[in-house]
């Protein structure tokens, strides 16, 4: 009962903060979607952190450490390296978006390549990639609230109620509501995760070093990279792959449009890698659970953090942990749905009507938020894979935008709009085929050395994308010159 009361209190507080953020603000399209381009360093930091520290960080990261061991460090490494790239990448994106008053990722591609069709394709890719990640957030929300309320709130009820809250404050306050909730969320998650990551190893083993000693004695395979599948080759290739895709996500891409100036990103690039150290404590929690809550297999490994918390702490603190976890779903979930709704409305439905009033686009975008939320809920109720597996599919889709984006930032863009379009479509089709049959390079190339077969399968469609992009660009450029 105590945990339920705490969860309810934080849920209501979140809803109030989200709604009150609208005060004295006119919610036109630019204000609703990108905060009137007025956010300072702190708010931009919280928004980007809000997208990074999600239910995957809370459940999937600890679950991966629990089941796969030390290879879970890849999450820390790729996020830290992504922040380094932001120092150079995001100011370029912001300057172009600010100059042309862009409000979505699709706007950027359409303007850069002077192609409405490319803008539509980018928007479709974004919406398709976003839905699985929204499913992660809602699935995680249901798991967290159901367990930390000791079953008082069934998972489906938690998902539905949480989705309704997301719809309410997203439609009313837009990105401003999300930014203010992110303040509460980041404070909560930082305090809870750091405390648990330090306290639990000391409580059960006498210290972090002793924890590693005991795991080494019982399950030494968790502390080294295996010789197959999750090898060093897999680790390096996966880190590189995720770094390439990190800022391709529509909601992360568009969050850069909210900043006042380009200096904001350079300041964040200095601070943010330090913040990534929080994920180290998530890994400590997952490793602590290995010997304390044994027997979690498959999708159940995502429950390692919560099962350990319920075994260790009083209900009141379990409620606080649940509230922090709930916020890791509400903040990114709402940003994802807002981004998808904006893409669907502005860049797909009204893509060939550039003179459509912003008020009309804003109204339809707000209407699309609950539509997309309901679709995501239906996917949650259909079941699904472990959180890390769902995340991989989303990244494999969205990273297909990478070649044409990087090319567009060059002084002389070698890629034509036809090349960008062909490359993205080929990459997406191969990604869908691979994901449908759960393929790896090891299954496609049996007998080859692990140095090749363990490369992240996501590079296969990406390489095909690059090859097709360059060939088509070369051919279409020649035809243009001849004409």
Image (cartoon, rainbow, N blue to C red):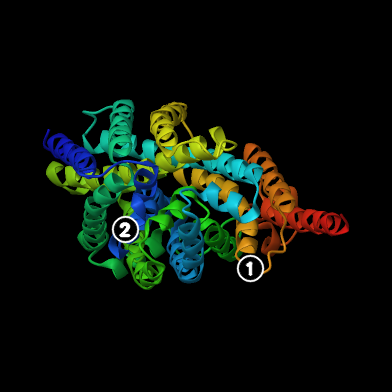
Q: Residue at x 15, y 47 (%)?
A: 317
Secondary structure under tag 1 reads loop
Regarding residue 324, the answer to whether it shows in the image is yes
Residue at the spot 43% in from the left edge and 27% down from the top edge: 371
Of mark 1 and mark 2, the one earlier in the sequence is: 2
Residue 97 percent coordinates (x, y):
49, 57
Quarter the N terminus occupies = top left
The Cα atoms of the two marked residues, 1 and 2, are separated by: 27 Å
State the residue at coordinates (77%, 56%). 473
Q: Nearer the viewer, residue 57 or 342?
A: 342
| Residue 103 marker | none
**Quarter-of-image position of residue 231:** bottom right
Q: Position of residue 202 (x, y in %)?
A: 22, 63
Query: Residue at coordinates 24% horizontally, 63% vertically from top-left?
Result: 198
The spot of residue 444 in percent (x, y) is 74, 48
Q: For the C terminus, which image quadrant?
A: bottom right
Q: Tell me if 201 is positioned left or right of 53 in this view.
A: left
> In the figure, is residue 267 to the left or right of 317?
right
10 Å neighbourhood of mark 1: few (<14), some, or many (≥20)? few
Residue 74 appearing in the image: no
Q: Is residue 320 above or below residue 91?
A: above
Write down the residue under mark 1: 410
Question: Dot 2 surroundings within 10 Å: few (below 14), some, or many (20 or more)?
Answer: many
- Determine the secondary structure under disc 2: loop
Residue at label 2?
Answer: 39
């Amino acid at each position: 009962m105590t945990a339920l009361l705490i969860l309810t209190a934080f849920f209501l507080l979140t809803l109030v903060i989200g709604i009150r953020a609208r005060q004295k603000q006119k919610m036109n399209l630019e204000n609703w979607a990108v905060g009137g381009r007025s956010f300072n360093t702190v708010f931009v930091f919280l928004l980007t952190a809000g997208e990074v520290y999600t239910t995957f960080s809370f459940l999937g990261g600890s679950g991966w450490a629990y089941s796969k061991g030390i290879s879970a460090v890849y999450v820390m490494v790729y996020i830290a390296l992504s922040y380094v790239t932001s120092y150079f990448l995001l100011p370029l994106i912001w300057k172009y978006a600010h100059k042309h008053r862009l409000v979505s990722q699709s706007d950027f591609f359409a303007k850069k390549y002077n192609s409405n069709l490319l803008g539509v394709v980018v928007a479709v890719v974004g919406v398709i990639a976003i839905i699985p990640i929204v499913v992660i957030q809602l699935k995680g929300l249901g798991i967290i609230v159901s367990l930390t309320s000791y079953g008082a709130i069934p998972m489906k009820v938690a998902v539905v109620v949480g989705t309704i809250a997301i719809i309410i404050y997203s439609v009313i306050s837009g990105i401003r509501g999300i930014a203010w909730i992110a303040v509460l969320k980041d404070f909560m998650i930082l305090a809870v995760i750091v405390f648990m990551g330090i306290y639990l190893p000391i409580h059960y083993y006498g210290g972090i070093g002793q924890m590693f000693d005991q795991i080494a004695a019982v399950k030494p395979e968790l502390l080294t990279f295996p010789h197959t599948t999750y090898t060093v080759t897999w680790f390096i290739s996966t880190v590189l792959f995720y770094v390439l895709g990190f800022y391709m996500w529509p909601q992360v891409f568009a969050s850069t449009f909210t900043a006042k100036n380009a200096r904001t990103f350079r300041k964040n690039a200095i601070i943010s890698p330090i913040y990534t150290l929080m994920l180290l404590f998530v890994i400590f929690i997952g490793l602590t659970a290995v010997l304390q809550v044994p027997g979690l297999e498959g999708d159940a490994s995502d429950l390692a953090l919560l099962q350990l918390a319920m075994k260790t702490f009083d209900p009141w603190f379990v409620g606080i942990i649940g509230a922090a976890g709930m916020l890791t779903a509400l903040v990114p979930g709402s940003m994802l749905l807002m981004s998808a709704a904006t893409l669907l409305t502005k860049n797909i439905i009204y893509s060939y009507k550039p003179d459509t009033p912003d008020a009309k686009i804003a109204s339809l975008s707000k209407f699309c938020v609950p539509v997309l939320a309901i679709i995501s809920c239906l996917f949650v109720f259909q079941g699904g894979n472990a959180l890390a597996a769902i995340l991989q599919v989303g990244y494999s889709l969205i990273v297909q935008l990478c070649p044409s984006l990087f090319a567009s930032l060059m002084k002389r863009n070698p890629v034509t709009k036809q090349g960008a379009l062909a490359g993205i479509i080929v990459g997406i089709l191969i990604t869908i085929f691979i994901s449908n049959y759960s393929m790896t390079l090891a299954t496609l190339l049996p007998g080859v050395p692990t140095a090749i077969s363990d490369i992240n399968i996501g590079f296969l469609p990406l390489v095909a994308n690059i090859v097709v992009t360059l060939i088509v660009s070369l051919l279409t450029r020649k035809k243009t010159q001849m004409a």
